Image (cartoon, rainbow, N blue to C red):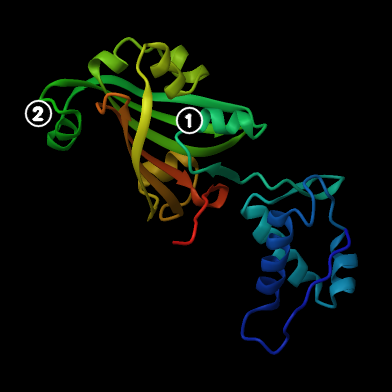
Amino acid sequence: MELDVTLHRNSPVPLYHQLAAQLKHAVESGEVAKGTFLGNELDLADRWQVSRPTVRRAIQDLVDAGLLVRRRGVGTQVVNDQVRRPATLSSFHDDLVDAGREPTTEVIVDERVRADTEVAAQFGCDPGDDVVRLVRRRSAGSRHLAVMRNWLPLDVGDGLTIEQLERRGLYSLIKERGFRPHSAVQRLGAKAASDEEAALLELLVGAPLVTMRRVLQDDTGRVIEIGDHVYDAAHYSIDMSVVAT
């Protein structure tokens, strides 16, 4: 791998952090292509004129972020497995498939519950009316990426099977039932992983998560889904276009 780096040795920012930041940019920008193998630590240390522990620490930061993977007997390889989603009305399952990943879904909860005040207000029903509540864990390969909590009106979600929910995206199932997703109000945020979320995503408690709250309407303006999702921030980002006004 040929990559020039510029390190500021008088900076208060540690050298390993400077090096990791430049490697991260090179991987995410495509300057260093997916599948590329890095040289061994001694060669890299010599090329960049830093110590071997500095190289090892920088590489480990990117391994932890999912951009590199250590392969025994082969070396360190660029994988860049961060999921980058467009800011469009789409299913996470379908976005993973489009990105060439193989999504798997574990249905943790699939039940009828009584709508609380907030859910009832969104659906236009009475508090205490039955709705469908889903909790699913979405993964790609061996990495857990998201915990997705959804609420559906009874006529939209009742009768969905665990097999369907494990094999397909929720929006394709909704469409198959005759409902037409049209638009959504979506709010993005961030939070620290709770005990439950950390356990499901196999992260440390307090690890950073991306949050998304989505309220989906059909083509008549009726709310047909509420989503409250959290994503491992190390492996998830959203791309969006902005224009000048």
Percent position (x, y) of residue 169? 48, 23
| Amino acid at pointer 2 | Pro
Percent position (x, y) of residue 19? 72, 70
Q: Nearer the viewer, residue 221 or 83?
A: 221
| Amino acid at pointer 1 | Ser
Q: Nearer the viewer, residue 180 or 146?
A: 180
Quarter of the figure with residue 48: bottom right
Residue drawn at 43 percent across, 41 percent down: 199
Looking at the picture, does residue 93 appear above or below residue 118?
A: above
Quarter of the figure with residue 56: bottom right
Looking at the picture, does residue 230 appear above or below residue 155?
A: below
**Marks 2 and 1, the one that precedes in the sequence:** 1
Mark 2 vs mark 1, foreground winner is: 1
Residue drawn at 44 percent across, 34 percent down: 89
Q: Residues within 10 Å of mark 2 (few under 14, many from 20)?
A: some
Please indicate whether residue 29 sits to the left or right of residue 238 in the image: right
Q: Which residue is mark 2?
A: 127
Percent position (x, y) of residue 21? 66, 67
Quarter that holds the N terminus: bottom right
Q: Residues within 10 Å of mark 1 (few under 14, many from 20)?
A: some
Q: Which residue is mark 1?
A: 91
